[in-house]
Amino acid sequence: MTSSNKSIIDVNNLVTHYGERKILKNLNFSVEKGEIRVIMGGSGSGKSTLLNHMLALLTPTSGSIVIDGVDVVNANRKTLLKLRQKMGVAFQGGALFSSMTVGENIKLPLQHHTELDEHTIDIMTRLKLELMNLAGFEDLMPSELSGGMLKRAGLARAVIMDPKLLFFDEPSAGLDPVTAVELDELILKLRDAMNMTIIVVTHELESAFKIADKITVLFDGEIVITGTVDEIKSSKDIRIQNMINRRARDEHLDAEQYIKRLTTGKN
Amino acid sequence: MLAVIKTKIEHLGDVGINLVESSGRLGVFLFNILARLWMYRFPLEETIKQVLFIGAKTVPLILISGLFTGMVIALQFYDTLIRFGSVELLGAAVAMSLIRELGPVMAALMVIARVGSATCAEIGIMRNEQQFDALDCMAIDSYHYVMLPRLLAAIISVPLLTAMFDTFGIGGGYIVGVLIHGVSDGAYLVGMADTIVWNDVWMGIIKSFLFGLVIMWVCLAKGFYLHIEQKQSGAVGVSQATTQAVVLSAVLMLFVDYIVSSLML
């Protein structure tokens, strides 16, 4: 796959294993600047592994991932550090440091990567907290926040440096419907206000259909389809239809294999 | 029969491989931390914070355990020395055993119990909650920001805590020897001053410095590599890593103790 000028992420022939097991099977896709791309798939489809590879937290077996012109698989430490200052990541559980207050957590990247004085850093921190509807919470400890607030605080920390690229892992997981919708609105607001490219990894259909410009659907480590919301909805692929209509997978059961599995514990 | 022997040999091989891997990881981990001393600015503020946790907050425990250790040593030595009519050697015996051996070892054990286990659990939970991934993604170096200040703080704090342990231990010995059993205070203090030489003090300082390094190194590494070394994740993994960290750091500390003693005596 060739990278276009407009693309900010290019994943080429990505293959990865956990031990002997192949997790990602030759993935190819690219993400354009300013796009909200949702990566969907069920449990065990490889979407979290793909995210970790894009964040350069794991090294693939083969293939390349080019982010903003940098091949993150082969980049040296310095190049990767520079690239990461242009990226923000909001983790599933927030990943806030429990020994610091919410405010201290959010201002951490600014303290490390800028020469701004403490007063300016405080103002910027409050600005981001306002954006996330968390004004007045900066002196609380993470343990005093609810699940939704933790995610929003994690998001505030992820965007404190005004990154070009934002990764968001499972924004709606474990949240009530109202809070989940609020987070979706926030993601849209961030894209529109700050012109960010946003990659969201999720298995929540409703949220994906609401925020995505394009959706990439993974099944068993392979890309089934990449397309707009309408294209996904009109896909004839049985796996996509099962996912949209919340139908269980209709797996053909081989009687002999089933007996063998029960008696020996092996496939 | 052959299959059983084969399985046993394979198991032995696995244990050997794990041991080599684990030792290699520990070595690389220490190298990575120490390399940050040259790669980045000195983490003064974070180190001071950690000295507060590792050092200052351990002081009450050190003082109490030092006092009682000194008292019990004095009691044992008094009971032995009085049989040989050499009770005037009590001060020298108490001070010598505390400064050379018991002070560094007991202070280190207290630090393992209070700080080592807590640090390993904290680092392990940070690993479980993706906090190290978050640091990597924020382009903040975990070795420099999290590990180096803790290691430096332990290296600074353990010798100071040992000195306090020794002082209170000698004080405890004074209470038992002089105040309770009526040994002459001149004999206790002058005997001590006449017998202890700088080499004894240096031995205690070198030991406690190395103990601080070993304890924090092992406890940090066990927490940091939780996801690689522990078969179970979550709370069970953290608990297993903490147990291993406490046992390994205590055993390594005693091994270092023997090596330093044999080199300096």
Image: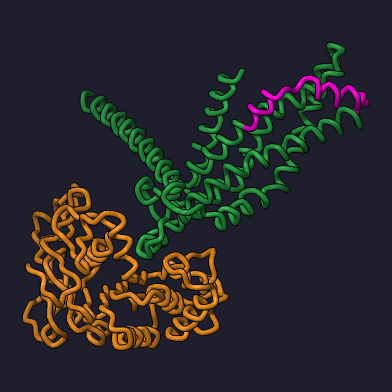
Chain colours: A orange, B green
- Residue B222, visible in the rendered structure: no
| Location of residue A6 with respect to B228 vertically, above or below | below
**Which residue of the protein is positioned furthest toward the top in this rendering?**
B84
Query: Can residue B104 be seen in this snapshot?
Result: yes
Q: Residue at x 14, y 51 (%)?
A: A260
Up/down of B63 relative to B127, above or below: above
Quarter of the image containing the N terminus of chain B? Answer: top left
The part of the image, by quadrant, that contains residue B70 is top right
Establish if B15 lies above or below A135.
above
Q: Residue at x 49, y 49 (%)?
A: B148
Q: Is residue B98 left or right of residue B188?
A: left
**Which quadrant holds the C terminus of chain B?**
top right
Per the picture, the main secondary structure of the magenta-coloured stretch is helix
Residue A245 relative to residue B229: left or right: left
Q: Position of residue A114 (x, y in %)?
A: 43, 69
Q: Report x, y in % for residue B264.
A: 59, 20
Out of B125 and B216, give the one closest to the viewer: B216
- Whole-percent x, y for residue A125 in the image: 48, 78
Does the magenta portion include B131? no
Quadrant of the rendered image containing residue A163: bottom left
Q: Residue sitting at 8 percent across and 54 percent down?
A: A256
> For residue B72, what is the image quadrant?
top right
Question: Residues in magenta?
Answer: B180-205
User: Against B20, is A193 above or below?
Assistant: below
